[in-house]
Image: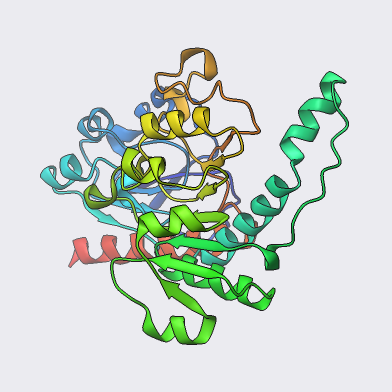
Amino acid sequence: MRKVLVTGDFEIGEDVFPIGFELVHIRGPVDEQQILDVLPDVQDYILGGPEFLSARLIDVAARLENVVVMGTGIASFVDIEHATKKGIRLANTPNMNFQAVTEFTLAMITVCLAKVFESVESVKEGTRWIQTPRPSLSNLSFGFVGMGTIGSDMAHQLHLRGCRSMHYWSRSRKVELEASLDLRYSSLVDIANTVDVLCIHLTSCAETRYLIDEVLLKNASPTLMIFNMSSPKIICPIALKNYLRCNTEAFCFIDGYYNEWVDNKGQHDDPHGLLSLPVRSLVVTSHLAAQEQETLNIIFARAATRVLEFAYDDVK
């Protein structure tokens, strides 16, 4: 009997895994211990929850053979080096969540332009009644860091909405998109200095760590709105804190944080000092961008298929 551990807050059908597989589903793991309690007997692991598969967890998982991450960025959820040393096969489900992430990003840009988070706070406190007119997306200039599937879809959706001022930086140029979407290829410094909204949709790796650093932010527009739907570690936290403190009209939205899940102790125990900033400067959410119901169903189905492929390969 193969034991399959699945984490993530979604429904799983009864017949996903055939006879011979035992399913353990932890919808919302509250701490590492909950996972540690079942890991020793697990052979296959579909990681769709908030946890990070650390070296500590991997060492306990004596029978673990295969890990499939429900998403693109394996490094954000698994200690790849340690898993590889242990001979664990790793896989992901790339390019399956782009529509959900695009939808979420556009929604968050609109919400933040309308100062919704500030409005919620001021209504609760009874201090202000905000009704600041928000600009239309079509009248703003956008910059993209990364022009993969999500970045391309974002540019396409904004183009459909009438946006004609879009710039991008990518590790490779996308000439065909430049022509069809009126995109302009530019340097990171030029983009950060000229656009109204900067969208980060870039795979996290050693090469992209702190790509947005002190030098870039010192030269950025003082009113820049940053929306990071990738790993938080693409932006240097020290540089970001200094930038937001010095530029009160600037703003950053991050879907995720430098300390996540059980490592996040909130604003009163935040080593980076960002969570104590007001919502007019910074909003952080808990990896919500891809959490669209149908998208999760599709991604899980692919992850389950990948697990079965691995398992059958092991039998051969």
Residue at the extreme top? 268
Q: Is residue 297 visible in the rendered structure shown here?
A: no
Percent across and percent down for residue 65 are: 23, 49
Q: Nearer the viewer, residue 225 or 14?
A: 225
Q: Nearer the viewer, residue 66 or 186?
A: 186
Q: Is residue 92 above or below residue 118?
A: below
Q: Is residue 166 above or below residue 78?
A: below
Residue 9 horizontal side relative to residue 48, left or right: right
Q: Is residue 254 visible in the rendered structure shown here?
A: yes
Q: Is residue 79 above or below residue 178?
A: above
Q: Quadrant of residue 223?
A: top right
Q: Residue at x 35, y 27 (%)?
A: 36
Q: Residue at x 49, y 64 (%)?
A: 301
Q: Residue at x 29, y 72 (%)?
A: 172
Residue 145 horizontal side relative to residue 133, left or right: left
Percent across and percent down for residue 16 are: 50, 61
Percent across and percent down for residue 263 are: 42, 23
